[in-house]
Amino acid sequence: MVERPSPEAGGNAIAVEVLDHAVAIRPSGEIDIETAPALRSALAQALAHASPAKPVTVDCSRVSFCDSSALNALLAARLTAQEAGTVVRLAAPNHQLQRLLEMTGALPLFPVDHDPPPADRSSKEYPHGLPR
């Protein structure tokens, strides 16, 4: 199942994909002060579907740039996840994101996977949110 936040939620929609083993979000391009609200929204939606057995995995393989606004969104989501007994994982972060995490001391706060989570080929897209 894929859920896309509305564009009004912060500009660019980022898909939230509920997989068997994780809740994946797949941002792409530059995540900065203008696009970080979309990341924050996607993280909140992903956390609503996460559990200790189904952590949130941020597929960073298509992220070309990440600034402190995006880092703040990731750190806030990490705290929310921790309170819920789950984690936020980062998958395939590029060199720039790794460096940002290292410079700020945030790298040890996130489990890092070398590969992004596989897409769920059976998932359905819900462009206007989950059906009720």
Image (cartoon, rainbow, N blue to C red):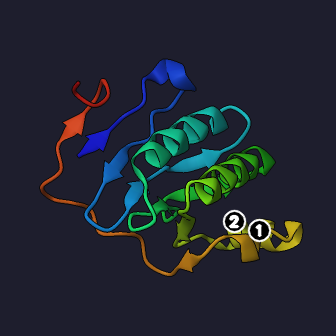
Instruction: Identify which residue is drawn at 87% across, 66% down.
Output: 104
Q: Is residue 6 above or below residue 101?
A: above
Query: Which numbered circle lies on residue 101?
Result: 1
Query: Which numbered circle lies on residue 53?
Result: none
Give percent across and percent down for residue 106.
79, 68
Instruction: Identify which residue is drawn at 42% across, 30% down.
Output: 5
Left or right of 120? Residue 117 is right
Left or right of 7? Residue 37 is right
Where is mark 2, residue-wise? 97
Tag 2, which secondary structure? helix
Label 1 neighbour load within 10 Å: few <14, some 14-19, many 20+: some
Q: Quadrant of the C terminus?
A: top left
Instruction: Identify which residue is drawn at 49% across, 48% down.
Output: 47
- Furthest toward the left, the residue is 122
For the residues marked 2 and 1, what is the alpha-carbon distance in whole angstroms?
A: 6 Å
- Between 95 and 13, which is closer to the camera in this rendering? 13
Q: Amino acid at mark 1?
A: Leu
Give percent across and percent down for residue 61.
49, 65
- Between 81 and 122, which is closer to the camera in this rendering? 81
Give percent across and percent down for residue 112.
58, 77
Give percent across and percent down for residue 88.
56, 62
